[in-house]
Image (tube, rainbow, N blue to C red):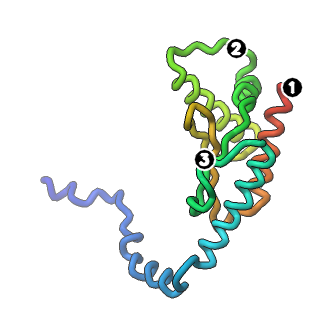
Amino acid sequence: FSAEFLWDGNRDYSSWIVLDVAMEFWKRLGPGLSPVHQYCHELLSDGSCYLVNEWKTRLLVPLEMCGSMSLVKLPPDVTSSAIAVLYGPQEQSTTSEEALLSAHAKAVQDCLYERHQVEVPIKVIEGSLWVRLSAAVYNEKADFVALAEAIAAIRKQTD
């Protein structure tokens, strides 16, 4: 009876099967930063610096410590703007500041996606909201510009 459930059919082992080939591919690219890693890191650096300048905020850690992901602090007024855009003026009731910030992060993330088709995680760190940026081979500078424009639009809608 238990043998019937030994293989559930929901596991995809293809990544394990091609692991040797994938490792050989990366080895052939040579030591140091491969062109892919270099592109992703340079794009992340450019995009992060662009957003820091646009928003007059800061990075959580120096770019030298980042591979293809970084965290940029959001301007403080974005939270209230996003909540107003999504839900209209309303009373906030919560028992903890952490819960309130988690709700704010969700509101900003939802607003970016629902109103501007921008998908990016919003995180609560040091009692503030941060956008977690990532760069991959399919990204370009225009993606970071679109994020900046979406945040600017959210901020303007409640002025």
Marked residue nearer the N-terminal end (1 or 2): 2
Q: Amino acid at mark 2?
A: Gln
Q: Position of residue 153 (x, y in %)?
A: 83, 37
- Check whether the beta carbons of the residues at disc 1 and disc 3 lie within 8 A of each other: no
Give the label on residue 159, or none.
1
Residue 91 sits above or below residue 64 on the image: above
Q: Position of residue 111 (x, y in %)?
A: 70, 35
Residue designated by label 2: 90
Residue toward you, 43 or 59? 59
Residue 134 sits above or below residue 98 on the image: below
Task: Give the Cα distance between marks 2 and 3.
Answer: 31 Å
- Viewer-nearest of discs 1 and 3: 3
Q: Quadrant of residue 108?
A: top right
Tell whether 6 sits left or right of 90.
Answer: left
Q: Residue drawn at (75%, 54%), measured in percent from left and top?
A: 144
Q: Secondary structure at mark 2?
A: loop
Tell whether 63 sits left or right of 114.
Answer: left
Marked residue nearer the N-terminal end (1 or 3): 3
Residue designated by label 3: 60
Marked residue nearer the N-terminal end (2 or 3): 3
